[in-house]
Amino acid sequence: MLFCKGKSYRVPAACIIAFTSMMMTLVYLWTQRHSLQPKITPQEGNLCRGEIANNTITALKDTRTFIIAPYFDDRESKMTRVIGIVHHKEVKDLFCWFCCQPDGEIYISKAEIYVHSDRFGFPYGATDMLCLEPQNCDPNFVSISWAHKGNIGQLPRFEIKNRKVETFPVEFTVCISTMFGNYSNVLQFIQSMEMYKILGVQKVIIYKNSCSQLMEKVLEFYIADGTVEIIPWPITSYLKVSPRWRFMEDGTHIGYYGQITALNDCIYRNMYRSKFVLLNDIDEIILPIKHPHWKIMMSSLQEQNPGAGIFLFENHIFPKTIYASTDIFNITSWNAVPGVNILQHIHREPDRKDVINPKKMIVNPRKVVQTSVHSVLHAYGDSVNVPIDVALVYHCREPLQGKLPKESLIRDTTLWKYNSSLIMNVNKVLQKTVF
Ligand SMILES: *[C@@H]1O[C@H](CO)[C@@H](O)[C@H](O)[C@H]1NC(C)=O
Ligand SMILES: *[C@@H]1O[C@H](CO)[C@@H](O)[C@H](O)[C@H]1NC(C)=O
Ligand SMILES: *[C@@H]1O[C@H](CO)[C@@H](O)[C@H](O)[C@H]1NC(C)=O
Ligand SMILES: *[C@@H]1O[C@H](CO)[C@@H](O)[C@H](O)[C@H]1NC(C)=O
């Protein structure tokens, strides 16, 4: 009966009765005898029949709420956590409509709405909608509505994921949030993918907004070989996206193609599928210095930091404008492939005074509640800063300190340690895709 206040919601009439203190026990016994759950009897023919939503992003009728996916989360109590995007001011009340099979009894629970704090000024932000689940059934579907009355048959239904727990079929998953802007950096993409594989990845999840046709072909290759899973990310059909992370008063709705929402979805999607999840961009590689690959590195880091769930790696810029000769390698055929050749970029920018290098993460997803890009916002485990003599984020992009001459940069050939397997593997992929 606690459900009547705060977190959860049944029909007001029922709540009033339940809380009339003298009647409380009687009512409880009565409802128990008549099976506790049904508080609303839906109209005949509408039982749990709403159409199943199959898209990654579903707009509710209010057009201020976008649902990505609900996930079962019993780490604190028996809840459904719906990952979505809402307008931070205009969405106030939302209700979860659970449908208990086999009788089709409806249970309505008021959502607690948590817009993530890292909204960076945009009106829309990544949001968790938390709903207590009914105690007496394990619903497989939920509908979300701003109303707590009406016809459930007209609401789309979302499958609640993570109800059946898989036990870590994979060790390492990389989450690439939002491939966008007709992405066509094919050579760097293949090199990053092959480096991830050498370092220990089994799955790479890509939230894809748009890419070039050649890139599409390369993605198909990696989907077929079982490495890549594409999550379509048509956010541009729903919101005005900014290519920047911070709001510039320019009328856009959400930052960086909704990156933060995608990352949070990726954490929950892989919570029980992957022992570790890496959150980095496709132009970034978490590069071990002391160890040959991630598995040995993570065993060592975990041993030294029991209780830690989040490992932070320093980002270092290797400008794509500063070249090293690669004559020692036999890779001239790569000149025909569009994109950056990372083997040519082994000079990193020095640390700047008073500038803290941003971090990228390897996390135990089961210890994460809310994540941002460079840190977690809410977690059950500690965060650990991994020193740069253990690993760094190799980030090949435009320079941040573009005025520095090559001599002022640090020559760092860690990437070249992997030259022979990297070159061999990239050549194999190029043979089957580009050439
Ligand atoms: C989603 O897929 C299911 C099964 O394929 C189908 O029955 C349902 O109609 C689809 N929903 C929508 C909104 O297209
Ligand atoms: C996408 O990029 C490719 C390669 O750079 C280019 O040929 C193509 O015209 C671009 N497509 C669009 C729609 O911009
Ligand atoms: C260079 O690589 C190509 C394949 O990309 C191979 O056919 C050729 O034999 C190699 N040359 C040498 C000198 O290793
Ligand atoms: C390329 O890799 C091999 C081992 O696979 C190594 O012996 C060699 O030193 C590497 N080359 C460079 C230039 O680092």
Image: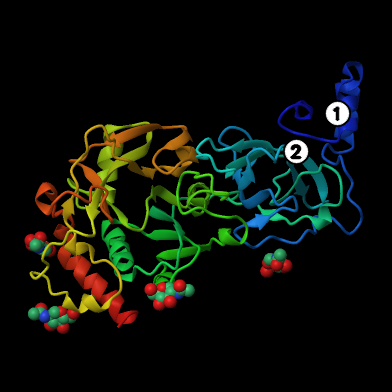
Quadrant holding ligand 4? Answer: bottom left
Q: Give residue 401's position: percent from left, percent from top.
A: 23, 47
The image quadrant where one finds the N terminus is top right
State the residue at coordinates (27%, 76%).
428
Q: Quadrant of the rendered structure where residue 290 is?
A: top left
Q: Nearer the viewer, residue 185 or 84?
A: 185
Residue 260 visible to the viewer: yes
Label 2 amino acid?
Ser
The answer to whether residue 203 is left or right of residue 326 is right
Residue ranking furthest to the bottom: 435
Which dot marks residue 15?
A: 1
Label 1 amino acid?
Cys
State the residue at coordinates (25%, 50%).
317
Q: Quadrant of the rendered structure where residue 126 is?
A: top right
Q: Height in image: 67 above or below 333?
A: above
Q: Nearer the viewer, residue 286 or 184?
A: 184
Disc with the residue nearer the chain's start (2 vs 1): 1
Q: Height in image: 214 above or below 241?
A: below
Q: Nearer the viewer, residue 165 or 222?
A: 222
Q: Which residue is mark 2?
A: 109
